[in-house]
Amino acid sequence: MTTPDWFIFRGDGEQHDGVAGLPDPPPWRDFDGGPVINGAPRLGTESTRRLGTHGLRSLAWRPEELELINAALYLRRPLLVTGDPGSGKSTLAHAIAHELGLGRVLHWPIVSRTTLRDGLYTYDAIARLQDMQMAKERGEPYTEDIGEYLRLGPLGTALLPYERPRVLLVDELDKSDIDLPNDLLNALEEGEFRIAELQRIARRQSKVPVLTDDDERAPVKDGRVRCRAFPIVVMTSNGERDFPAPLLRRCLHLDLPSPRNDEWGAARLGAMVRAHFGDGDMAANDELISSFLQSSPGSLRAADQLLNAIYLTQEAVRDSEPDRRRLAKLLMRPLDHGEHGAR
């Protein structure tokens, strides 16, 4: 496929500076936060694990998938990515960060107890009180540095006024409490949030350095965090629940089908396998890929099962073809068959 000229993310895994070529955002998505932060932390080890160590190659993306991904970049809108486990939802965030040179992915895993505040920032009031008490007991003056007790979460860090966008992965949003998607909507729409603890002292201390999710210090002015380059937000869902209409209207929805026995399914799995295991022994690996795609059509299977099967058959039973096939079949059983449940 010839890559259209307007694509910023090309999906080929080759690093480039294409994000610098993004046009100005639409007027309704233009943000003016400051002071501007230049640069981004290096690519995280999680991206290396997700994409593989052999050149951090990308997956094979369908043309319509690339169009939606690039549309989200141009429009400065979050991507809501749905699909079965192993379809590449979380990997997309790491592929974008790697290809566009945007540094470490800010990862916010969602559970049923997660609140918006968890993603924005935490304030350790107890530690601050203990430090004040210890200073008093030693007869020493307590020099207040409230920034030492504040830490921005993944969402809060993503909304800092970086010159270039950060990549934020909101993982498994469908596992959240019913209120979180609505609470998240305002922060993503406004591109900002306020830290009440800093607003209370803004008159006497306007700029306070706080710890970020990258374990670095960033200045927050007047208790207000506002982005400059809107982050590239990838929100994943396994389809366990529906989301409110206001959130859906403000996202672009990308559905990633499970790997199947067609041109793109085979290409995507082949790229994934090569990224993790290199080009050696690909004849045997291609046989396992074909078996993975063809067995039990319509059943639920995850790409992790294929990677586990390849690794174990390469390391444990490489010299025994019958054992290799038997073990691979055992590890790649469909996930949705009743006989595989708990007994």
Image (cartoon, helix red, strand yellow):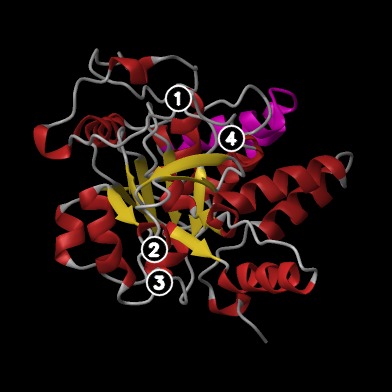
Amino acid under label 2? Leu
Kind of element beneath mark 2: helix
Return the x and y of residue 22 as percentages of the image width and height. 26, 20
Amino acid under label 3? Ser
**Disc 4 target residue:** 51
Judged from this view, the residue extending furthest toward the left is: 27
Of marks 4 and 2, which one's residue comes earlier in the chain? 4
**Disc 2 target residue:** 173
Distance between the alpha carbons at the discs numbered 4 and 3? 26 Å
Position above or below: 79 against 131:
above
Kind of element beneath mark 4: helix
**Mark 1 touching mark 4, by CB under 8 A?**
no
Label 2 neighbour load within 10 Å: few <14, some 14-19, many 20+? many
Amino acid under label 1? Asn
Which mark is nearer the camera, 4 or 2?
2
The number of discs equals 4
Kind of element beneath mark 1: loop
**Disc 3 target residue:** 176
Of marks 3 and 1, which one's residue comes earlier in the chain? 1
Label 1 neighbour load within 10 Å: few <14, some 14-19, many 20+? few
Membership of 159 in magenta stretch: no
User: Which SS type dominates the magenta stretch?
Assistant: helix
Of marks 1 and 4, which one's residue comes earlier in the chain? 1
**Mark 3 touching mark 2, by CB under 8 A?**
yes
Position above or below: 247 against 17:
below
**Disc 1 target residue:** 38
Give the magenta range: 265-287
Amino acid under label 4? Leu
Return the x and y of residue 72 as percentages of the image width and height. 25, 37
